[in-house]
Image (cartoon, rainbow, N blue to C red):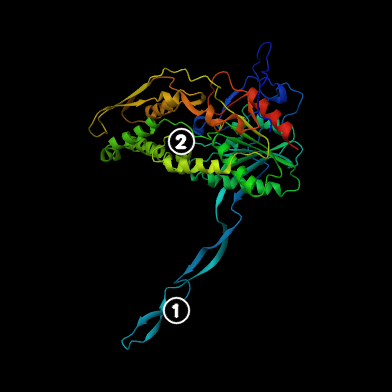
Amino acid sequence: MNRKNFSIIPFLLCGTLHAEPVTGEYGLIINAENTISLFPAEKSVAPVKNASLGVKRAFVSAASEPTSKWYINHPETNRVCREWLYDGQFPRVAIKIQKSNKAGSNVKALARGRRCIYWADLPKERYGTAAIYQGNDNVLNKVVVIVQPYIVSLDNATYSDTHFYNDVNQGLFANSLRNAGYDVILYRYLNTDLGVAFNARGVKVLLNKLEKLPSVTSTSIVGLSMGGVVARYALAELENETGLHKVASYVSFDAPHLGANLPRSITDNISRLLSKIDTVLCGLNSNCRSARTTLKALLSKIKTKTYNELIINSPGGATDRQVLLNKLSSLGHVDSIPSLAITNGAQHATQSYPNKALVTHYKLHRKWYNGGSKYFKVYTNPTLDNQSGGYADFYQVLSNLIAQQPHPITPYVVLGQKHSFVSTWSALAGNEGNFTEVASYPTTNERHLTITYNKAVKLRQWLDAHHF
């Protein structure tokens, strides 16, 4: 394959910006800098309103509900009883029990009986859902599957179809696809935390389902962050097993193929903070109980299989991470179809931090906390934090989370402690040659999962060039 860097020609906007968004090529909003948040609670999930944008093309309105929805499950089932009729509702069943009477002979005894009155065939595994938003031709034929990123939800709130659609459609990208006749399928995991391989099985089931539909001529798959790794895993397995017959192309959008950097000092200090809480005194106060529950929920997220697989230096996650890396290496890269890598990281520019650790100070007041030092510190790690790559600001997120809780901790935050989250090297899986093409690098590092106007234009150009 011809592997090269593709330079995106910036669209220059002349004149004065209007109050309403101005659209350019493909009906995409010019100068859009839209970021998909990994913390969905930070953003509103109100449906996008499409006012008149002064464009000749009639836009498909943003849909709060999909055209249809598929539940993606393992094709095999287990037969299980969903409803039993127990003793008292049904006469006891006489069964032979090895019980001796005084004479030493076996006797029959009445055991507590039950019988099943409702059997059901349930899937062996449940993977996720595929929300289908059909294009303007109302025929499911040119499919673009978008695989979700890792979404952090401390209260187990559902990342809804509406929220996912609005995330993708911030710069009118989803609308642009649908107006061009593409069918957008948003694939959401049922359980993000069960690991890459488990969620890749769901993507494989979805692709197999699409392949069997006569109306579908071609499918492209776009993986956002974690979704890029899940999609790569699924495509590589299918490539080795049956081949990719109707799959037109694969796009990896700032995916952590070699891992992501969520600073270890943050997770270590969450554990340390929880260990200092006086659980008796805390239990007497609803505010403290609520704060402790939030911190425990956050800590539980960093003990999951997916977190251990994808996060560099995760506590206790070295084995899971190495297993995943070894498996991806053995599968190889997706070679039989065109592949595109998009990174939010610059090619060479760092995050512009000094090469010394920055510090966030926290002060614990004595009201609910055990003895020991009342101060603790979170240090940055310049070796990882300063690399070129799509950045995040989890130092700030932790500080804000603590500051917003009604418990006596005072954070002294160094503002702007952003850090490389998915390095450019990781987004390329270690080498540009792993992909048919690499979209042009941004001049400076962008926030992870930022879909700029130029990136959205490139995605449209790529899909138009490779769908059949």
> Is tag 1's residue or tag 2's residue first in the polypeptide sequence?
1
Relative horizontal placement of residue 433, taking residue 319 as reference (left or right): right
Residue corresponding to mark 1? 95
Residue type (three-letter) at the residue carrying disc 2: Ile
Q: Nearer the viewer, mark 1 or mark 2?
A: 2
Q: Residues within 10 Å of mark 2 (few under 14, many from 20)?
A: many
Task: Say which residue appears at 77% left-offset and 24% top-offset.
Answer: 56
Q: Nearer the viewer, residue 411 or 390?
A: 390
Residue 352 at x, y = what percent? Answer: 47, 17
Mark 2: which secondary structure? loop
How far is mark 1 from mark 2, CA to CA?
A: 55 Å
Residue 221 placement: quadrant: top right
Q: Nearer the viewer, residue 340 or 128?
A: 340
Task: Say which residue appears at 41% left-offset and 76% top-offset.
Answer: 111
Q: Name the residue at the top extreme.
A: 15
Residue corresponding to mark 2? 311
Q: Quadrant of the C terminus?
A: top right
Residue 125 at x, y = what percent? Answer: 55, 53
Residue type (three-letter) at the residue carrying disc 1: Ile
Q: Nearer the viewer, residue 17 or 390?
A: 390
Q: Is residue 117 above or below residue 430?
A: below
Residue 230 at x, y = what percent? Answer: 56, 41
Query: Looking at the image, how many numbered discs can be counted on the residues?
Result: 2
Q: Is residue 428 above or below residue 207?
A: above
Q: Nearer the viewer, residue 3 or 272?
A: 3
Task: Say which residue appears at 39% left-offset and 37% top-offset.
Answer: 294
Residue 163 placement: quadrant: top right
Residue 414 visible here = yes
